[in-house]
Image: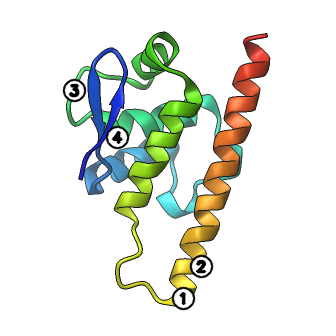
Amino acid sequence: MYYPIQLDKMRNFRYGMKAISLIEKKLGKPIGKIDLENLTMEDAAVMIWAGLVHEDKDLTPEKVMDLVDEYSDVQTVLTAMGEAFQGVFGNYGENDAKKEYREEQAIKFKKSLDKIVEVSEEKNK
């Protein structure tokens, strides 16, 4: 499943097994162990890159940062990325415990996004 985001052109997030594997390799830990409440901008760029690289093999996390800065904003892109992640880790067939865990992770992810945006806005003042 694809989730569109407008940057220099319309691009599409896709978080399949390959993208998740890229994130795990770059960040050095399993996806479930990534501390979403303390993501750095570099970590966020890696996660964005992994979801977009399927369409553009020349894309890098550094280029992702440039695209976000030039054509969008951190909050918009991270929100779209979050929606794409939720689409991958949806709730089909979940029992209550799994659903509660997923919802907790979504809340942590949202807090992390808010923190990243806050830090970014402070740096731009």
Instruction: State the residue position of label 1.
Output: 96
Residue 35 can be seen, yes or no: no
Marker disc for residue 51: 4
In three-dimensional space, the C-alpha distance between marks 2 and 1, rounded to whole angstroms, equals 6 Å
Asked whether the viewer can see residue 12, the reply is yes
- Whichever of callouts 3 and 1 sits on the residue coming sooner in the sequence is 3
- Residue type at mark 2 is Glu
Residue 30 appears left or right of 10? right
Residue 55 appears left or right of 66: left
- Secondary structure beneath dot 1 equals helix
Q: Residue flagged by tag 3: what amino acid is it?
A: Lys
Q: Reading the chain from its start, which is encountered first: label 4 or label 1?
A: 4
Foreground: disc 3 or disc 1: 1
Residue drawn at the location 42% of the way across and 54% of the way down: 85
Residue 94 appears at what percent x and percent y? 43, 84
Vertical arrangement, residue 11 with respect to residue 86, above or below: above
Local crowd size for mark 1, using a 10 Å CA cut-off: few (<14), some (14–19), many (≥20): few
Q: How far apart are marks 4 and 2 (CA)?
A: 25 Å
